Amino acid sequence: MKKNIIRNYLDHNLKKLEKKNFSNSRLPLSFAQYDSKDILNSINTLIKGWPTIGNEVKQVEKKIQRFLRIKNAIMLNSGGSANFLILYLLCSPYAKKEDKLHEGDEVITPAVTWSTTVSPIIQNKLVPVLADVNLSTYDININSIEKNISKKTKAIMIVNPLGHVCDMKKIQSICKKNNLLLIEDNCESIGAKYNNKFAGTFGKFSSISMYQSHHISSVEGGMILTNDDYYADILRSMRANGWLREVKNMKTRKIFLKSFRDIDESFMFPYIGFNFKPTDLSAALVKNQIDKLNEFINKRKFAARKIIKNLNKFDQFLYLPKEYSNIKNSWFTFPIVVKKNKFFTKKMLTNFLTKNRIDNRPIIAGNIADQPFIKKFKHKKKKLINAELVMNSGFFIGLNHMLNKKRVDYIIKVFNKFFKKTIKE
């Protein structure tokens, strides 16, 4: 009885939150993915007295493994931590000889990305080599990858951006030809597919994010995906202080226990460690959202396709997102780049959208080469023509599972109003 009262209270307040966020036709970038049941699950970990890493985390990992058809999913406190730990492992003494990265090795990565793709490359004393991207899809440009390969290139760290998947066939071919490691930053594209294979399952490692504004949310949270059991065991340990208790392989455990007999098994640290642990509190919040992920993706797809269909008449002024038959998008946001024209600028359009209560933001971090932090560190770049255009003329509006027909129609109405007011030929 008390549980039903609490759920009714939570449902009532979530409805109030929805009304507030979408009031007066306001369209926010994102909206809470969790419902009253998810919140109660999360609260329950506090009541049980063990809200830190535990059984809920294991359940989420197993669900992600089944959903994405991957052998190992290791939950961490963020997607950024996932990217860092992947590269740290590859630079560490634990890396296999054929995978080992050394100080000064070059890693090719797209110029249009988030800071936590590039920062871990620098933090691990590697050199980011920034490649240009394609317009409309904002994925890494294949020709730019090939032009940036040098004798020092050891890895490609792609980003599957904004729910889209890179050209994995060509990228895998490049990696095979040049003996390069492939790492996927899949933080923005969980559930997307390339030739019916999930994004994030092509590389040696990949990362996903479950941040508040993403497809599913543990508020803060991320994952490392890999099919390599050897690395997965070390990653589990390294995320949690380097503890032996996180090591699943019994053969490995026995080797350490035999070699260090005087150390208490519960407090043995075989690997160097970090405190990148997730919590059961956050895992319990996101656990049931995984079951609704396909539903969330379909709702985003409905909104994206309807907006594209209705804005295509303005394609002489706008680069709109594109879909391809071999790619199933997991729409994250709706990106737009304004083409050079005599009638309006990006600023004029985004100001109009803001005035009409449609939230908008730059496309990811724009051209990362223009961001202040990277100028202090060694990096390489050639011409980044499209990345510069994205930086100067690009923005996105939100796509989320709450965009129903009425709200999508409002977005289209506002764009039509802007063009009617602005374009005078």
Image: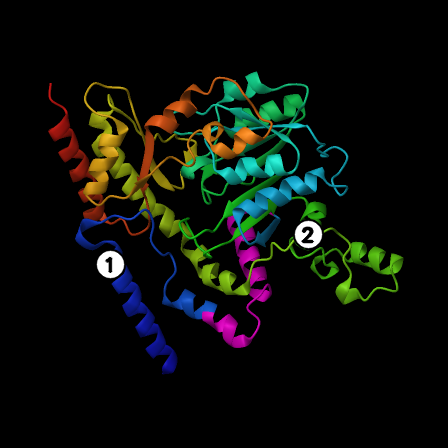
| Separation (CA) of disc 2 from disc 1 | 42 Å
**Front-most of residues 413 and 395:** 395
Mark 1 residue type: Lys
Residue 202 in sight: no
Q: Residue 201 carries which label?
A: none
Report which residue position mark 2 lands on: 238
The number of numbered badges drawn on the structure is: 2
Find residue 95 and report its image quarter: top right
Question: Residue 31, position in %: x, y?
Answer: 33, 53
Q: Is residue 363 left or right of residue 210?
A: left
Is 53 contained in the magenta span? yes
- Is the N terminus in the top left, top right, bottom left or bottom right quadrant? bottom left
Question: Residue 389, position in %: x, y?
Answer: 37, 23
Q: Is residue 418 left or right of residue 205?
A: left
Q: What's the coloring here?
A: rainbow
Find residue 385 and report its image quarter: top left
Residue at image coords 22%, 39%: 353
Residue at image coords 20%, 18%: 342
Q: Is residue 239 above or below residue 386?
A: below
Mark 2 residue type: Met
Is 361 contained in the magenta span? no
Magenta span: 43-70
Cβ atoms at labels 2 and 1 below 8 Å apart = no
Q: Is residue 20 above or below residue 27?
A: below
Residue at image coords 73%, 34%: 100
Secondary element under disc 2, as helix, strand or loop, is: helix
Report which residue position mark 1 lands on: 20
* Other-residue count near label 2 (Cα within 10 Å), few / some / many at <14 / 14–19 / ≥20: many
Residue 85 in sight: yes
Magenta highlight: main SS: helix
* Other-residue count near label 1 (Cα within 10 Å), few / some / many at <14 / 14–19 / ≥20: few
